[in-house]
């Protein structure tokens, strides 16, 4: 009798729970569509009603491209979840990220930034405005143009090593070959080489020792782990939208990946401790922190947490921009010729090419800027949370707690702002392009903020420019580059998990013919 009752009640109860859940979701969806304060903001109904399409796009890595299509359809202000909007309106940069009349910028949304369980808070993950400002003040002296000058020999050393290693590849019987005129050549996937050089530079600048990626022609095991981090962080964030599911979803992350993360954190802590325990003769990023930290502005946890994030922020981004630039240059040989002629025109008197000599080169800066426009390394500025008092973005008054983000990739390719928006046209950044007679005169340059703005503007902007200019210049002076038929990469096909997916960019290289 009892068994029969159990048989009857269990399915009934399960059915009742399921029905209540469906009912709850249905009622929420109806509320979100017809009664929510954001109900009048344009956007697809399915995205406005529930967060499921958003999460699905995140997990598939198609988020940035899906949203780009939605912006084209619905305009620059778009509802992409019940309580979340995203913008391709240029004024969103200023409205969201700058301080206004004494109120700080909108804080980062904890869903994305709450420190993962294994490590401590740092500059990138600090949500509180005062904590962020304190850390930023302590870290900034290592990233000024003055600091960069004293760091230049380190950067030069690794860029020279990059050239040497690629040169060996052309001459090596295993990777190179001879063309029908007897000239040595090699087909090289250039993409990892940009990572090798930026990781090695950053390792030396931050921890006083290289990761030896260039020497070994492969990623340091620690660096390899970093490639999993953005995809994993995306999954963690997706799980956080349903807090009651979070623990269960965390368990889906493979234990091997969790262990990797813990090992990585352990290695950051070890490297930071090692660097803090010895004096270096040259200036690096850590020097000003150690010198200026007399009142303990940065605790050891703060330093560890900040350097953990800096390794990715400081290398993967620059490598993505360089990869994108090379991909577009080999597919557009007319611009490759122009910038190559320019950097080879710097002369060859045996003296080192200095960073200062590259600042004003117009084609060099134009191709890099155009690459940043089309291949934005951070395609989506992650959501900020409107404070309780509410706020205004792009002229729309928003209730407190609304999430707001900026679609940099979509904005930088929006035909409403850019002439021939999807085409690689570096001349739009030449000085003459700002004259009324130029076809690019109407380009909306304020829509382009590759390093963001406000108190959280990229800390490494000077270092990024220095690396991009020097690496491009030295490569183009040393080698002739060419596209390889059948191996062309379409940048638009790359997925995004916070950062842009990396795929081979195969180029044919020869020693420079001049
Ligand atoms: C082309 C290369 C780079 C691009 C396009 C880039 C872009 C950006 C953007 C858009 C942000 C703002 C993200 C946000 O607030 O959500 C940012 C922040 C940041 N970047 Fe970069 N970045 C680059 C290279 C670097 C380098 C080389 C470093 C350091 C070595 C660096 C360190 C940082 C740090 C620490 C932050 C956080 C700043 C803060 O919250 O105060 N970045 N970057």
Image (tube, helix red, strand yellow):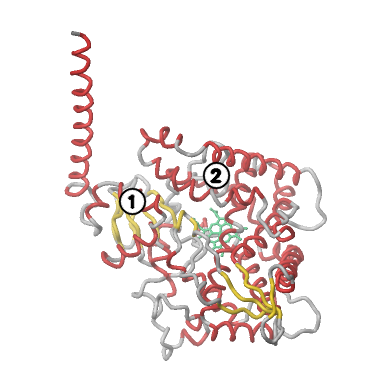
> Which quadrant, please, contains the N terminus?
top left
* Residue 347, image x, y percentages: 74, 86
Q: Quadrant of the C terminus?
A: bottom right
Contact flag, marks 2 and 1 (Cβ < 8 Å): no
Say which of 97 and 381 sits in front. 381
Query: In this figure, which residue is indicated by the disc labeled 2?
Result: 131
Q: Which residue is mark 1?
A: 54
Q: Quadrant of residue 493?
A: bottom left
Considering the numbered disc 1 on the image, is that residue within a helix, a strand or a loop? helix
Q: Report how many numbered discs are placed on residues in the image.
A: 2
The residue sitting at the front extreme is 180
Can you say whether 497 is above or below 6 in the image? below
- State which image quarter holds ligand 1: bottom right
Q: Residue at x 37, y 75 (%)?
A: 417
How many other residues sit within 10 Å of disc 2, few (<14), some (14-19) or many (≥20)? Answer: some
Front residue (pair 458, 500):
500
Residue 169 higher or lower than 87, as above or below: below
Q: Quadrant of residue 316?
A: bottom right
Q: CA distance from mark 2 to mark 1?
A: 31 Å
Image position, residue 410 (x, y; %): 39, 66
Instruction: Pinpoint residue 168: horizontal percent, then vertical percent.
Output: 74, 70
């Amino acid at each position: 009798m009892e068994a029969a009752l159990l048989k009857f009640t269990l399915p009934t109860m399960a059915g009742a729970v399921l029905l209540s859940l469906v009912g709850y979701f249905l009622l929420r969806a109806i509320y979100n569509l017809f009664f929510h304060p954001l109900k009048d903001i344009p956007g697809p109904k399915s995205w406005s009603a529930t967060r499921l399409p958003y999460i699905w796009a995140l997990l598939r890595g198609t988020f940035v491209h899906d949203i780009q299509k939605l912006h084209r359809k619905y305009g620059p202000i778009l509802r992409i979840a019940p309580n979340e909007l995203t913008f391709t309106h240029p004024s969103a940069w200023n409205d969201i990220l700058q301080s206004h009349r004494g109120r700080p910028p909108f804080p980062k949304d904890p869903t994305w930034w709450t420190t993962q369980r294994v490590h401590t808070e740092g500059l990138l993950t600090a949500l509180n405005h005062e904590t962020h400002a304190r850390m930023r003040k302590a870290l900034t002296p290592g990233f000024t143009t003055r600091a960069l000058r004293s760091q230049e020999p380190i950067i030069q050393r690794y860029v020279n090593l990059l050239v040497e290693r690629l040169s060996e590849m052309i001459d090596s019987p295993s990777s190179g070959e001879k063309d029908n005129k007897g000239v040595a050549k090699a087909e090289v996937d250039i993409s990892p080489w940009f990572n090798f050089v930026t990781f090695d530079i950053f390792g030396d600048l931050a921890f006083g020792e290289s990761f030896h990626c260039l020497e070994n022609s492969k990623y340091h095991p620690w660096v390899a782990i970093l490639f999993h981090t953005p995809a994993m962080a995306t999954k963690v964030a997706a799980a956080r939208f349903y807090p009651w599911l979070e623990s269960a979803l965390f368990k889906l992350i493979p234990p091997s990946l969790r262990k990797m993360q813990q090992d990585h954190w352990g290695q950051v802590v070890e490297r930071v401790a090692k660097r803090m325990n010895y004096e270096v003769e040259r200036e690096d990023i850590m020097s000003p922190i150690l010198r200026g930290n007399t009142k303990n502005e940065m605790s050891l946890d703060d330093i560890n947490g900040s350097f953990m994030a800096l390794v990715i922020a400081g290398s993967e981004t620059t490598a993505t921009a360089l990869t994108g630039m090379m991909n577009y240059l080999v597919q557009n040989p007319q611009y490759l010729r122009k910038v190559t002629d320019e950097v080879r025109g710097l002369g060859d008197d045996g003296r080192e090419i200095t960073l200062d000599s590259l600042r004003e080169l117009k084609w060099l800066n134009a191709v890099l800027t155009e690459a940043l426009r089309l291949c934005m390394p951070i395609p989506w500025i992650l959501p900020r949370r409107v404070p309780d008092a509410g706020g205004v973005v792009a002229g729309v008054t928003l209730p407190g707690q609304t999430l707001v983000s900026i679609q940099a990739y979509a904005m930088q390719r929006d035909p409403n702002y850019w002439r021939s928006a999807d085409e690689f046209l570096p001349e739009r950044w030449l000085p003459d392009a700002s004259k009324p007679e130029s076809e690019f005169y109407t380009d909306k340059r304020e829509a382009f903020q590759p390093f963001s703005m406000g108190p959280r503007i990229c800390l490494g902007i000077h270092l990024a420019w220095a690396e991009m200019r020097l690496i491009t210049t030295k490569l183009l002076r040393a080698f002739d580059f060419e596209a390889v038929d059948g191996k062309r990469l379409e940048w638009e096909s790359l997925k995004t998990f916070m950062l842009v997916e990396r795929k081979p960019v195969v180029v044919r290289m020869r020693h420079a013919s001049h």
